[in-house]
Image (tube, helix red, strand yellow):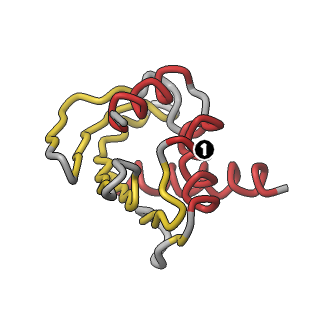
Amino acid sequence: MDTLKRWHEIIEQGNPELLDDILAEDCVFFSPVVHTPQQGKALTRLYLSGAMHVLNKDFRYVKEVVSPEHAVLEFVCDVDGIIVNGVDIMSFDEEGKIREFKVMVRPLKAINMVHAGMREMLERLSA
């Protein structure tokens, strides 16, 4: 499975329902604003779905560093006039599925905006 290629297709389509194909059951999500790791496929899918809604305006990857076990993808997008810059760090299991997904964001103003937007979106998605 070419997980990274599939990830890019999911982002381009904006369809988080396709995430189940590439997430490992025991996937762990590390948020830039929540201090505890989010355990499991369902929570990882929830957070990634929320992020796809919050960071959707002109979201694009500008750099990639990839090995068979890991990928680091730098992204930029605009959220309400604030340029958000960050990285998605993925680790893959032996089947090629994402077993760990970590997001880091800068600058602080962007983190605060993403935090507020994600809180609102996660409440809507969880309802």
Q: Position of residue 22 (x, y in %)?
A: 47, 44
How many tags in the picture?
1
Kindly give the residue lying farthest to the right in the view shown: 127
Rendered view: 122 above or below 8 = below
Q: Nearer the viewer, residue 6 or 89?
A: 6
Locate residue 100: give its quadrant: bottom left
Q: Position of residue 15 (x, y in %)?
A: 61, 29
SS under mark 1: helix
Q: Nearer the viewer, residue 38 or 77?
A: 38
Residue at the image point whose x is 29% and y is 53% from the top: 89
Where, quadrant-wise, is the N terminus in this rendering? top left
Rendered view: 22 above or below 4 = below
Residue at the image point whose x is 40% and y is 52% from the top: 98
Kindly give the residue lying farthest to the bottom in the view shown: 36
Residue at the image point whose x is 31% and y is 54% from the top: 92
Residue at the image point whose x is 53% and y is 72% from the top: 39
Q: Position of residue 122 (x, y in %)?
A: 69, 55
Give the amino acid at mark 1: Ser
Q: Is residue 95 left or right of residue 67?
A: right
Where, quadrant-wise, is the C terminus in this rendering? bottom right
Q: Position of residue 30 (x, y in %)?
A: 42, 65
Q: Residues within 10 Å of mark 1 (few under 14, many from 20)?
A: many
Q: Is residue 104 left or right of residue 115?
A: left
Q: Is residue 101 left or right of residue 114?
A: left
Q: Check disc 1 and report the residue beneath it.
A: 49
